[in-house]
Amino acid sequence: HHDWFAGSIGILDSRAGSNFPHGLTKVTAEIAWPECGNPPKDPIEKEEYHASSAYTAYKTPYPLAEDLFLVSARRGGRGGKFVLLLMDPYGNRELVYEGTHNIWHAMPLKARPRPPVMADRVEWPDLAKPAAPRKPGILYSNNVTYGVPELARGEVKHVRVIQMDARTYSLWNRDSGFSGPRTSLVQTDGVRRILGTAPVGADGSVCFEVPSGQALHFQVLDGEYRALQTMRSFSGAMPGETRGCLGCHESHSKTPVSGKSMALRRVPEKLTPPPWGTRSLSYERMIQPLFDRNCGSCHQGKGKARKKLDLTLRPGLGPFKEPYVTLVGVDGHAHKQIRQGPGARIACPLPAENYRQSDPESYVTFRPKTYLALRSPLREIAASGKHHGVKMTGDDLRLLTAWLDANCTYRSDEDVRELADPDFPGIESLPIRPRTKTAPRIPRP
């Protein structure tokens, strides 16, 4: 996605799979995949393919038939000109057009009937009238356990909805990792807030309202509000829009379940906010006080266990303080464990990238019940009562569980907006001045 003028040509076949090396074969065998290079397994579309030393990069192919396509090809090295070829997977090439400038994005044009136009499902606000409250969206699933044999239907009790706030703030310079201000040690992240939960029916179905125009992701929870599986991307709904999903499936290409479920026979549920409300999650404001209340007598001050694991809030790694750094124990950007010994990584965060880059076969979907609160030694110690009689309960345990399931985010919206606006030589020349404390608050959509 960086060196996009150095492309090779590949053919996708969803019937063969959706995770490389399955479902992707290379046509131009002599050209390495840009940026990442060639993997150990690199299937070639046609063994009879013959290379051409005249062309060193390809771009914007357009299929014409099963074995024929238009493609832009570059002559020579960087700075060379792209011309338009007619090509097949065997390596046969025919020059179609060479111009004064590069030729990209070629496609055939012909008259055709206008395809059907779907009716707009969004209830857009009337800009001629005073602003009215945004209508919510509605999300549903006939069975959230569909396609996941590890999840028993009666095991899932709730769906949790997490919102990632849109970034309107910036330090301009990175304070750590890929962003600034950085909000998590585990991954490049944004400010997260838990909007609430909705009940899952006995048949696995769920239907609930969500705020429109927001980036949302979902988790299915057990009866103790622990995530059994978590969504690794985002979704959302526009005002008045109704959307459905198949459940916690591994592939988006699964066939939907037919029939009308229990949840769809009722009015959509309104989310039940957590006990602490919908404020964005903050380690220092919300999680550290849990340790102060429940663990401080032994692991802080003059406590005997402090030498083994110090739970005092103190400087740690860049913007992240201890004991957060030890409990998380891993730098997601560096892909390495950064703390050893007692307490290291007992939060059990989900790795930002679940694969070894030298082995594409390891790039697979996380299986349910493998990370986060359900597998966290920290939660087990806090909740079991077996650790010197200490037992976290009630809202404290619910909050700790939710924070672990939110992958151990550190900064909240309040934390970010307490940071002074950046100021450095030349800032006046920037077209948009970066801000934190005075960053705009923009309602969406």
Image: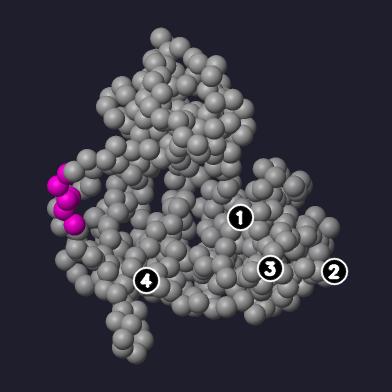
Q: Of circles 2 and 3, which is in front?
A: 3
Residue displayed at 58% across by 42% down: 2
Disc 2 is placed on an element classified as: loop
Q: Of circles 2 and 4, which is in front?
A: 4
Give the Cα separation between the discs numbered 2 and 4. 50 Å
- Tag shown at residue 295: none
Q: Position of residue 441 (x, y in %)?
A: 54, 78
Of callouts 2 and 3, which one flags the residue occurring earlier in the amino acid sequence? 2
Q: Amino acid at mark 2?
A: Lys
Q: Which residue is mark 3?
A: 430
**Picture quadrant of residue 397:** bottom right
Q: Amino acid at mark 4?
A: Ser
Q: Amino acid at mark 3?
A: Leu
Give the Cα separation between the discs numbered 1 and 3. 24 Å
Q: Position of residue 316 (x, y in %)?
A: 79, 60
Q: Amino acid at mark 1?
A: Thr
Q: Which residue is mark 4?
A: 212
Of callouts 4 and 1, which one flags the residue occurring earlier in the amino acid sequence? 1
Of callouts 1 and 3, which one flags the residue occurring earlier in the amino acid sequence? 1
**Picture quadrant of residue 309:** bottom right
Residues packed near mark 3 inside 10 Å, few (<14), some (14 to 19) or many (20 plus) = few
- Tag shown at residue 302: 2
Up-down relation of residue 43 to residue 330 (above or below): above
Q: Are marks 2 and 3 in contact (CB under 8 Å)?
A: no
Q: Position of residue 286 (x, y in %)?
A: 62, 73
Residue 319 part of the magenta-drawn span:
no
Q: How is the image coloured?
A: one colour
- Tag shown at residue 188: 1
Give the Cα separation between the discs numbered 4 and 1. 24 Å
Magenta residues span 112-117
